Amino acid sequence: MMEARQQLKETSGCPEGSQLLQEAMDNICGTWQSIADLITDLDKDAPLTEEILKDPSHPVPQLLLHFYSLECYLYKTLNNALRFGDLSKVDSLGPYNKVMYEIVRYGSQGFNFQ
């Protein structure tokens, strides 16, 4: 959500601190939270474990992959940060990137790439 707020600040054209910008930020964060709330049968405060990330049918990896597949700021910002070594995104997208790496790593262990 921190990155969603930053992207909105950078792209909206609204002046910093304006009521319109604040309402837009609240709406975006509310939307992302609503999507995350679709997972109801899960302790959201529990840590992500290797077992969770290895299980492609688990709702957490599915949700994180779904977020990435949406054509929104997340995909573009994460790819640009990785491509160009943008260290300013480490605090906001670093943890998400690490989890995505683990999901892909565990998912590819059954494949023989040659």
Image (spheres, rainbow, N blue to C red):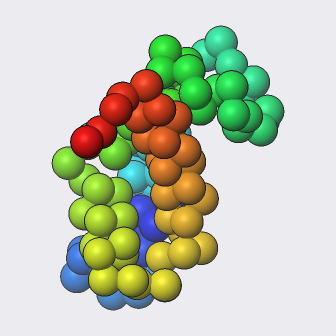
* Residue at x 29% of width, y 65% of height: 79
- Image quadrant holding the C terminus, namely top left
Q: Nearer the viewer, residue 19 or 51?
A: 51
Q: Is residue 114 visible in this depiction of the protein?
A: yes
Image: 44 above or below 70: above
- Residue 72: x and y in percent read 25, 53
* Residue at x 49% of width, y 57% of height: 97
Report the residue that reaches farthest toward the front: 114
Report the residue that reaches farthest toward the right: 46
- Residue 103: x and y in percent read 50, 38
* Residue at x 59% of width, y 73% of height: 91
**Left or right position of 83 against 33:** left
**Left or right position of 9 against 29:** left
* Residue at x 46% of width, y 67% of height: 3
Q: Nearer the viewer, residue 104 or 111?
A: 111
Q: Nearer the viewer, residue 98 or 19?
A: 98
